[in-house]
Image (tube, helix red, strand yellow):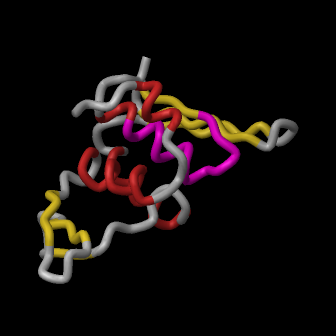
Amino acid sequence: MTLTREQVLDMGAGHKLDSEIAVGVFRWDRERVENAMDAWLNGVCGAETIPYYSTDIDAAWKVLEKLQGEWSWEMKMNNAAKEVELRIGKGWATSTNVPLAICRAALLTTIGEGT
């Protein structure tokens, strides 16, 4: 199922959004492991757990690093509103949480729902 812009913008920080970033941005493949916990094949070094892209600024920064070769990005801070607006390519999102804004904008760009 392809996500819509509204679905992405309604997504809160957490495992679901982190999973979508792992697949949509980093091109990981999902597989079930023996103990029934989710693992992901990351295409580089085997199975590993999904980073907390939407809540950890270090992990979110890796999203920007991954996309910066293909897309330009811009971040604007609105101190009065305590909000950040982030644009990656045509994808843009606002949030009071910087990693969440990065993830939403990145996902919107990769699914072509940036405008």
Question: Dividing the picture into quarters, in which one does residue 101 lie?
Answer: top right
In the picture as drawn, the residue positioned furthest to the bottom comes out as: 35
Number of dots carrying numbers: 0
**Is residue 84 toward the left or the right of residue 4 in the image?**
right
Question: In this orientation, which residue lies closer to the viewer: 42 or 35?
Answer: 35
Q: As drawn, which residue projects farthest toward the right?
A: 80
Is the residue 20 above or below the residue 86 in the image? below
x%, y% of residue 39? 22, 71
Residue sitting at x 12%, y 81%: 34
Task: Residue 35: name its quadrant.
Answer: bottom left
The image quadrant where one finds the C terminus is: top left
Q: Nearer the viewer, residue 5 or 102?
A: 5
Q: Residue at x 26, y 45 (%)?
A: 24
Residue at the image position 39 percent from the left and 32 percent from the top: 108
Magenta stretch holds residue 39: no
- Give the answer, above or below, for where 11 lies relative to 4: below
Indicate left or right for 78 with 65 as reference.
right
Magenta extent: 94-107
Residue 59: image x %, image y %?
Answer: 45, 64
Question: Splitting the image into 4 quarters, where does residue 79 fall?
Answer: top right
Q: Position of residue 102 (x, y in %)?
A: 50, 46
Point out the image quarter for the N terminus: top left
The verdict on residue 98 being magenta is yes
Residue appearing at x 24%, y 69% in the figure = 38
Vertical placement of residue 102 versus 49, above or below: above
Q: Position of residue 103 (x, y in %)?
A: 46, 46
Main SS category, magenta section? helix
Nearest the camera: 39 or 94?
39
Q: Residue furthest front?
A: 36
